[in-house]
């Protein structure tokens, strides 16, 4: 009796409202791309392939946030045909920069941008994928980190939990030996409340972290915000920095609302 | 030959482009009644939420419009805001900006050439399939792309949404020795880029031409990338089908500040992206326009490679107007960008400060740069404290949309006259015609200033 050839896991990559940067991160794995393509069957990935095969899929990577009624239907369909569903990036995980509309009157936004808003169908909110369907794993970042993305995919292939730490950017500065920009220079830095993963890039370039990976697993805003104020940020500055790429992340959202109530 | 009646062809999801769009064709007998590139990418309202942000923020925020050309957004935003504040960035800081932009040209163009466009010329669905027959060519492309990313990562911290660009320059500038490791990688990349030009020059190109006006930035002494003056080369007025190569015509220019007087956007019902026209006419930005307007200023090895690839000599006034050959121009621009990066690294001396101060003041500023896929214009209005009160962003895809639709119409029309193509054949032809322009669809869905096209509305 001959063994059946091992079936390669089927990978699908999906896009919702986004900049394509997290999908591009997969194509930026230049050294690993062709090897990865031998391990998995790329069944659906519109940015990279004009061939598209129907589900079911073993792993769906989802980029982008939900901003239209059709998107709501589409994400339910994708969930139904995916064994595991992983969100990649700040849009899919926390609504993305386009979630700034959540604080505004979208009809006014639409009228400001389009002469004929009736031509353009959009929801009043930009929401993460988890607001609509169960998600198996959320990978943070605007954009996601290449090494973490490969870890998530290979962990799935091996049937284990991805080793993606949930601590703050401060840990990565210490690991890298970067001098703390807040302590040494009084530069406002979101590192203490921001999820690790980027490798603490901004402080190594002498700027404060601006929170593009969203909140870390434990945040202490009552202790943290006074530090930002000490280093020269006023209420509006604090609100702006929390309301940028991860504005719909619950911890950043709550902290920014608290600021405005002061 | 069977006569086919009226039919409608709909391509629901364009593949191997950045962002999401669809195609819609209406054919009556042998006539194309309508050819539309519909962009259904959901709107993200950038111009609306940039209002009320600090003037220091647009470089980081607008980079999120496009993950493939974030440097183009960062530098167009910086130039526009510095213009509003009356600050000029020059010397080595300007050279470093050009260097990081060279990285983006190498990375983005190589992505398009190898991963998105080349599979068309080999009848493959994707790069993985292409690698089965052309492994060495694909590996060379991946290596070249990596070299582009290496420049952006070294200067910007990461390849997608780099963090080191700021108003007035950079948060931190490298020492000479930090740049040195790039040199070896780029020397290898120069070989790879030259081989890539030869590889794509050997593809089979359909006979095709276009009669769009061409728009690109131009500089007196170098191939424009991160700055320049908008320059227009009008379309030839000869009758009949346009030839693939034409003689250059005299150009005209206008100031970056007058951009909005010349390039005007209007909303159309079938697309979330606006259509822009240049002085009321259809126009094209991107590699073909740049090569026509600035080709004579390419580095000597890039210019020689262009001649050898059959693009014609821009110094003799030859202009390539075959959209399919844009892949060759892109490859030539990659070679130029690698060469230029090596030149910039060689001449680099660290500036005394990583940035010049940009104090806020009330006013409106304009900035334009050459994104890999075409001219990208930003303008911002600031109040005296530096709060953004208005933002207008005009990306290349919005400008190219009319030209792409005209290419689609012409391609389909020619094939209807010369045969009886099936829907599948027409679909493949149309997708190729769109990919020629490397449209960045995520970029194209957010505009502010527009005039209402009521005649074309009908809702």
Image: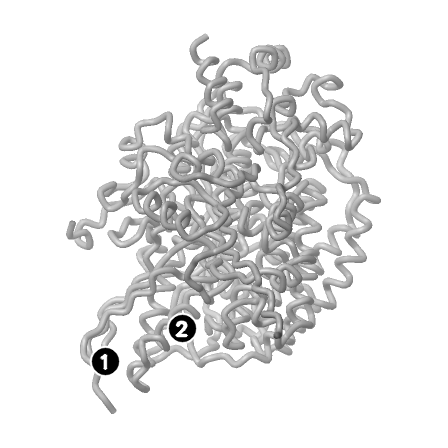
Q: How is the image coloured?
A: one colour
Image coordinates of residue B336 in percent, x first then y, are 66, 62
A242 horizontally vs B349: left or right: left
Identity of the residue furthest to the front in this view: A1
Q: What element carries label 2?
A: helix
For residue B30, the mark is 1
Q: How crowded is mark 2: few (under 14 residues within 10 Å), some or many (20 or more)?
A: some
The quadrant holding residue B294 is bottom right
The quadrant holding residue A17 is top left
Decide: marks 1, 2 in contact (CB < 8 A)?
A: no
Looking at the picture, tell me which residue is in the foreground, B440 or A96: A96
Image coordinates of residue A203 in percent, x first then y, are 70, 29
Residue with the mark numbered 2 = B428
Residue drawn at point x = 69 percent, y = 58 percent: A31
B31 horizontally vs B316: left or right: left
Residue drawn at point x = 56 percent, y = 11 percent: A222
Q: How crowded is mark 1: few (under 14 residues within 10 Å), some or many (20 or more)?
A: some
Kindly report which numbered mark, 1 or 2, lies closer to the viewer in this rendering.
Answer: 2
* Subunit ID for the residue under disc 2: B
For residue B4, the mark is none
Whether discs 1 and 2 lie on one chain: the answer is yes
Identity of the residue furthest to the top in this view: A262
| Residue B220 appearing in the image | no
B2 horizontally vs B227: left or right: left
The correct choice, above or below, for B120 with respect to B272 in the image is: below
């Amino acid at each position: 009796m001959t063994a059946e050839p091992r079936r390669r896991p089927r990978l699908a990559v999906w896009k919702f409202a986004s900049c394509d940067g997290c999908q591009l991160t997969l194509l930026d794995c230049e050294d690993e791309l062709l090897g990865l393509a031998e391990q998995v069957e790329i069944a659906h990935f519109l940015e990279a392939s004009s061939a598209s095969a129907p589900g079911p899929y073993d792993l769906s990577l989802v980029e982008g946030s939900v901003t239209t009624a059709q998107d709501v239907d589409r994400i339910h369909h994708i969930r139904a045909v995916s064994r595991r569903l992983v969100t990649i990036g700040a849009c899919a995980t926390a609504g993305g920069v386009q979630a700034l509309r959540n604080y505004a009157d979208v009809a006014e936004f639409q009228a400001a941008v389009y002469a004929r808003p009736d031509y353009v169908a959009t929801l009043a909110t930009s929401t993460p994928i988890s607001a609509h369907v169960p998600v198996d794993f959320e990978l943070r970042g605007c954009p996601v980190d290449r090494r973490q993305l490969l870890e998530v995919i290979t962990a799935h292939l091996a049937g284990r939990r991805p080793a993606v730490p949930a601590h703050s950017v401060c840990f990565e500065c210490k690991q890298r030996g970067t001098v703390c920009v807040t302590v040494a220079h009084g530069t406002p830095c979101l590192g203490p409340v921001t999820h690790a993963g980027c490798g603490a890039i901004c402080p190594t370039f002498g700027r404060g972290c601006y929170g593009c990976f969203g909140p870390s697993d434990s945040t202490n805003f009552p202790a943290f915000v006074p530090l930002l104020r000490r280093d020269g940020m006023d209420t509006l500055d604090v609100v702006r920095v929390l309301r940028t790429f991860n504005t719909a992340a619950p911890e950043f959202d709550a902290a920014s609302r608290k600021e405005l109530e002061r | 030959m069977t006569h086919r009646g009226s039919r409608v062809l709909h391509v629901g999801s364009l593949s191997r482009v950045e962002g999401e769009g669809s195609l819609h064709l209406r054919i009556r007998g042998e006539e194309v009644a309508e050819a539309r590139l519909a962009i259904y990418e959901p709107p993200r309202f950038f111009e609306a939420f940039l209002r009320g942000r600090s003037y220091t923020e647009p470089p980081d925020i607008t980079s999120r419009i496009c993950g493939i050309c974030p440097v183009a957004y960062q530098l167009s935003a910086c130039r526009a805001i510095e213009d509003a504040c009356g600050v000029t960035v020059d010397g080595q800081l300007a050279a470093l900006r050009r260097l990081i932009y060279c990285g983006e040209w190498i990375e983005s163009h190589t992505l398009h050439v190898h991963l998105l466009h080349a599979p068309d010329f080999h009848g493959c669905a994707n790069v993985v399939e292409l690698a089965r027959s052309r492994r060495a060519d694909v590996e060379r492309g991946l290596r070249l792309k990596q070299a582009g990313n290496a420049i952006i990562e070294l200067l910007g911290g990461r390849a997608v949404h780099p963090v080191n660009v700021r108003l007035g320059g950079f948060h931190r500038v490298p020492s000479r020795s930090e740049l040195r490791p790039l040199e070896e990688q780029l020397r290898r990349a120069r070989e790879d880029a030259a081989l890539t030009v030869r590889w794509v020059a050997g593809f089979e190109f359909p006979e095709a031409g276009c009669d769009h006006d061409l728009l690109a930035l131009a500089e007196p002494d170098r191939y424009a990338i991160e700055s320049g003056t908008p320059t227009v080369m009008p379309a030839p007025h000869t009758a009949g089908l346009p030839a693939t190569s034409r003689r250059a015509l005299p150009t005209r220019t206008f100031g970056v500040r007058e951009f909005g007087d010349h390039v005007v956007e209007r909303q159309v019902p079938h697309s979330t992206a606006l259509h822009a026209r240049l002085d009321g006419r259809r126009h094209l930005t991107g590699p073909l326009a740049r090569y026509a307007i600035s080709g004579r200023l390419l580095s000597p090895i890039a210019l020689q490679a262009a001649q050898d690839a059959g693009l014609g000599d821009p110094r003799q006034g030859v202009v390539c107007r075959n959209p399919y050959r844009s892949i060759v121009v892109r490859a030539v621009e990659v070679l130029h960008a690698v060469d230029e990066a090596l030149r910039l690294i060689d001449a680099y001396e660290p500036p005394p400060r990583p940035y010049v101060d940009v104090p806020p003041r009330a006013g409106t500023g304009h900035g334009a740069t050459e994104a890999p896929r075409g001219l990208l214009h930003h303008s911002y209005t600031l109040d005296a404290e530096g709060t953004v009160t208005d933002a207008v962003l005009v990306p290349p895809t919005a400008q190219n949309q009319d030209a792409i639709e005209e290419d689609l119409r012409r391609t389909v029309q020619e094939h209807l006259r010369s045969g009886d193509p099936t829907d599948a054949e027409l679909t493949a032809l149309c997708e190729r015609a769109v990919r020629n322009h490397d449209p960045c669809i995520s970029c194209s869905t957010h505009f502010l200033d527009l005039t209402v096209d009521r005649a074309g509305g009908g809702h």
